[in-house]
Amino acid sequence: MFLSRLNDTKIGGSDQVASELITSKADTMTSLFADIWRSFLNLPSWVQIWMFLVLGPVNMATLAFLSQPSGMLVAALAVGGLAISLTALIADRGFTKLVSAGHVVTWAPLVVILVFARPGATATYDTFLTILLAANIFSLIFDFNDLRLWYKGDRAVFTKT
């Protein structure tokens, strides 16, 4: 349907068809974000708070420390986990246990680095790295189990039960 409508938008095609195509694409994006938002709202309240007030902000804050020792690596692993998880979130149009894969793939190595090869740091950066480490260890406790469940077949988009 999309390709046949796209062909109608060639020069000389109907302006109405082009307008409908643009509206259709906008509706699809709105629907995607609405589906993801609904799925987020169906997560337990404590998970919503954890993600919005702690996990997301702490991992994104790594971008403020890019000039610190290993700052680029720390940020790449921290933000990379969010980016990979976002891919699963979009593909599934909501929260599934596969979202945890992005965290496991990048945050597990980050935790190993922060525990065994912690970069030299100022007091502020060191305190931040400790907060980042604690947040990601806490998250990984759930993420490893969620990924295990996903591999065992739990592929459902999260909704209230």
Image (tube, rainbow, N blue to C red):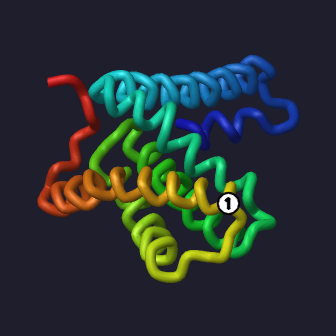
Which kind of residue does numbered mark 1 sit on? Ala
Is residue 68 found left or right of 103 in the rendered image? right
> Residue 74 falls in which quadrant of the image?
bottom right
Is residue 137 found left or right of 119 in the rendered image? left
> Residue 119 falls in which quadrant of the image?
bottom right
User: Residue 147: x, y in percent?
Assistant: 25, 59
Give 155 or 125, whichever is nearer the viewer: 125
SS category of the residue bearing label 1: helix
135 is higher (above) or lower (below) than 2: below
User: Residue 3: x, y in percent?
Assistant: 60, 43
In percent of the image, x 74 and y 26: which residue is there? Answer: 18
Name, please, the residue furthest toward the front.
Answer: 123
Where is mark 1, residue-wise?
123
Question: For the residue carrying disc 1, how many other residues have a C-alpha within 10 Å: few (<14), some (14-19), or many (20+)?
Answer: few
Name, please, the residue furthest toward the top.
Answer: 16
90 is higher (above) or lower (below) than 70: above
Name, please, the residue furthest toward the bottom.
Answer: 117
User: Residue 9: x, y in percent?
Assistant: 76, 34
> Residue 21 falls in which quadrant of the image?
top right
The C terminus is located in which quarter?
Answer: top left
Give 135 or 149, whichever is nearer the viewer: 135
In percent of the image, x 50 and y 77: which residue is there? Answer: 113
